[in-house]
Amino acid sequence: MSSSKEKPTLGGTRIKTRKRNIAAPLDPASFSDAVVQIYLDNNGDLELVAKSVESIDLDFSRYGDTFFEVVFIGGRTQPGTTKPDEGENHPYSVIECEPKREVILPYVIYIQKILRRRPFLIKSLENVMRRFLQSLELFEENERKKLAIFTALAFSQKLSGLPPETVFQPLFKDNLVAKGLVLSFVTEFFKEYLIDNSLDDLISILKRGKVEDNLLNFLPPAKRSNEFFSEHFTNEGLPTLVEYNEKKMFEVKLKEMKSALTTQITEEADIADVIETVKQQVRDSKLPDIEVVRVLWDVLMDAVQWSGKNQQQNANSALRQVKTWAELLNTFCSNGNLELELMYKVQMQCYEDAKLMKLFPEIIRSLYDQDVLAEDTILHWFQKGTNTKGRQNFVKALEPLVKWLEEAEEEE
């Protein structure tokens, strides 16, 4: 007699389970010991070390930071310090070498080789450098010097795209700046980098590091002045950097003055208040009179509402602006040289701006009528002016005014 029931089997039911990646426990100590042993086996010969590192089967993607700790310090660092942890160490690290470029350059070339083979390690190099630079106070003075030389050479050698912000941004910790550690680091860095590179190259790095706008931020707050910056870097043999900073500060001051003036003129502030603002800016910033005159004219003309095609409307707008702000111009065009500079400024603007090309004689006449320009200044420009831009046309256009001035002088 047969049964319709299936006979039980011994196989049991197979339950599907999801596979999981079981992470191996982190063991940076063993990794560090293995890399240290490579240094010891090769007596610190970096070419041989590089070959061994390239061929060894270690988990660099996992222990990249530990690798660079071994490179810089000689072993794995203790948490929160720059000192080697327990375990194997070697005496061939960056920190242990002499603070000389010819000694440190091979380390840069060595790291370059490693990064070409394992480009993913650039992130670990960034991490370790950022950590060390944020902890400058934990290094001895000569160790900081070695780090500065290494960093300068790394940029000189264009070390696998090391981002400048990785280097410069971590330095702006208040305590590091206040102690003068940042100033001594960047001074060493600038000196070393400029041996092989131009000032333009350095400025390019500073721009990419987002620090070129105000180099004074490297100075301790108690010494943060242009005077101290100039004195310090002149004494350190970097006059080109001093010149660059002075030019940069000059541009910043001009920009600030232009901005303040633009606001007041656009809002049609009282002319006495505007004059006082300019005087205050000149006192604070020690701006040369000639630059003040140039800025005044730029701001006044920028504030005019120009017409696209109506030449007469443009002429009226320009002349109205001159008349409105004549007292302001008169206050700062205080001698013949400054008046002549204003004439050159008007000449250049009329030369460069097609809609103003024919307005030159009218503007000059208006400036004369408002006592901004003296007769002698106009005659000097007419007879001996040195700016050649459009001069031939402008001289011809100014002939009627000059003739009138000369005739009036004869009558007197």
Image (spheres, grey):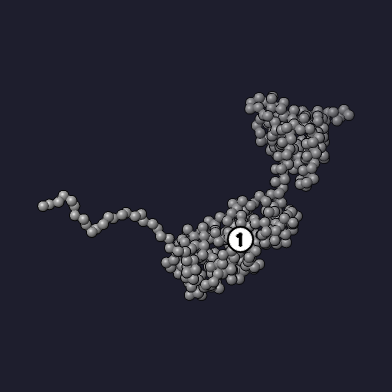
Q: In this view, does 126 lie above or below 399?
A: below
Query: As drawn, is 316 to the left or to the right of 120?
Result: right
The residue beneath circle 1 is 133
Quarter of the figure with residue 184: bottom right
Seen at 56% across and 55% down, the residue is 163
Seen at 51% across and 65% down, the residue is 66
Seen at 71% across and 51% down, the residue is 246
Is residue 21 in view? yes
Q: Percent x, y for residue 110?
A: 51, 66
Q: Is residue 215 above or below residue 89?
A: above
Quarter of the figure with residue 69: bottom right
Q: Which of 208 and 236 is in front in this view?
A: 208
Q: Percent x, y for residue 221?
A: 72, 55
Seen at 53% across and 69% down, the residue is 75
Q: Percent x, y for residue 215?
A: 67, 53
Name, please, the residue furthest toward the left.
1
Query: As drawn, is 15 to the left or to the right of 376?
Result: left
Secondary element at image label 1: helix
Q: Nearer the viewer, residue 130 or 285?
A: 130
Is residue 384 in view? no
Q: Nearer the viewer, residue 176 or 338?
A: 176
Q: Which of 187 and 27 is in front in this view?
A: 27
User: Looking at the picture, which amino acid does disc 1 mark?
Assistant: Leu
Give the total of numbered labels: 1
Q: Percent x, y for residue 9?
A: 21, 57
